Amino acid sequence: MRAHLLIAAAIAISGAVITGQGQPKSCDRDCLIGIAEQYLDALAAKDSKRLPLANPRYTENGQRLKLGDGLWNSITARGSYKLHVADAIAGQVVSFATMRENGTPLIVAVRLKVEKERITEIETIVARSENGAKGLEGMGQPREAFSRLTPPTERMTRPDLVRTANMYFSGMQLNDGKGKYPFADDCNRIENGAQTTNAAGRAGQARPDPKTATGYSAMWSCREQFESGLIHFVSRIRDRRYVVVDHERGLVVAFAFFDHDAGPSRTFQTPSGRSVTGGPVQPWTWMIAELFKVEGGLLHEIEAILERVPYGMPSGWSTWEDGMSDKIQWVR
């Protein structure tokens, strides 16, 4: 019964969340991306006076700060990688980008809310992963799928795009290996610049068998990882805020938290009936910005920026109740 309820929750969105799509704001996609570029330039220059501001609320890794504090003190330059996802309906844009902090490469995910061409909200995740930043820059540019338009006759509705993306989170949270996992055959995931699916093994390394392994492998496909049931130690995926949807390109960006309780979730049964114990031995949380490419009801490309934070940490944008919930939150 519990499994059935969780699977149902994975595909359900209340009418109150998805109704009232609204009309595009005055700032279209090009305008939003232009403001995002302006923001990254101003950040690199440590000069917020360059920005069109409307008394914005600013958070950095979940902490509310005065604009100009935190990363604005230590940043020294922009990097070479950038990926913008804009939503003119919601008036929001999310940027994944590499930067330099006192010369050291890092990654940021920045959400801007724009009203009347002025910034009213700024939410930043700073992932201090030097190797991750170098990995993204080594790619040269984002994957082509993120800029490719979905043919008009094949475009999914905004709610259906979010439903499909949410099945990823709910499937991982339940992770009994028996769920409905909407992965395309070409699905690939990159996290902090590292390929975490379909990865090549080290020289001489054998590809683990999902049916006998005791931990999931980056050498497996998206589907194999989920069907192995070996991601069970992710005990909760909460504060699922769907902040940007690009309907024309089939893109969805979510901000969320992945909790590891280091308790009962560490011991579980795989789909084949084996008992396995694994995962973190201390409670902690990933703070995540995750981008999904969705076409034909399936997940194709996934890209995530993530930073380890204290267990149970809030985002600074939700109520405590919503922050602890795994329900869909449609952010406007």
Image: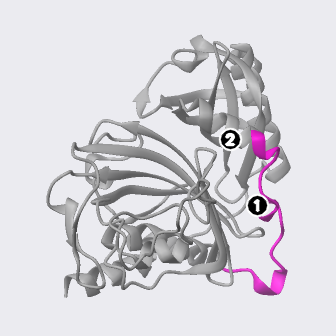
On the question of residue 116 being in view, the answer is no
**Quadrant position of the N terminus in the picture:** bottom left
Q: Which residues are magenta?
A: 138-156
Element under disc 2:
helix
| Residue at the spot 43% in from the left edge and 75% down from the top edge | 210
| Residue at the spot 61% in from the left edge and 60% down from the top edge | 199
Q: Is 150 left, or right, of 96 in this rendering?
A: right
On the question of residue 313 being in view, the answer is yes
Label 1 is placed on what type of residue?
Phe
Quadrant assignment, res 249:
bottom right
Where residue 319 sits in the image (x, y, percent)? 31, 47
Mark 2 vs mark 1: give the one in front: 2
**Quadrant position of the C terminus in the picture:** bottom right
Q: Which mark is residue 135?
A: 2
Query: Which residue is more in the foreground, 211 or 79?
Result: 211
How many residues crowd around disc 2 within 10 Å: few (fewer than 14), some, or many (20 or more)? some
Mark with earlier residue (2, 1): 2
Q: Which mark is residue 146?
A: 1
Are circles 2 and 1 on residues that touch, CB within 8 Å? no
Query: Which residue is more in the foreground, 32 or 311?
Result: 311
Which scheme is used to colour this image of the protein? one colour
Q: Measure the alpha-carbon separation of dots 2 and 1.
A: 18 Å
| Residue at the spot 29% in from the left edge and 54% down from the top edge | 279
Where residue 155 sits in the image (x, y, percent)? 74, 80
Query: Which residue is more in the foreground, 56 or 125?
Result: 125
Q: Is residue 150 magenta?
A: yes
Q: Residue furthest left?
A: 264
Q: Is residue 138 above or below residue 24?
A: above
Quadrant assignment, res 53:
top right
Quadrant assignment, res 325:
bottom left
Where residue 205 sits in the image (x, y, percent)? 54, 59
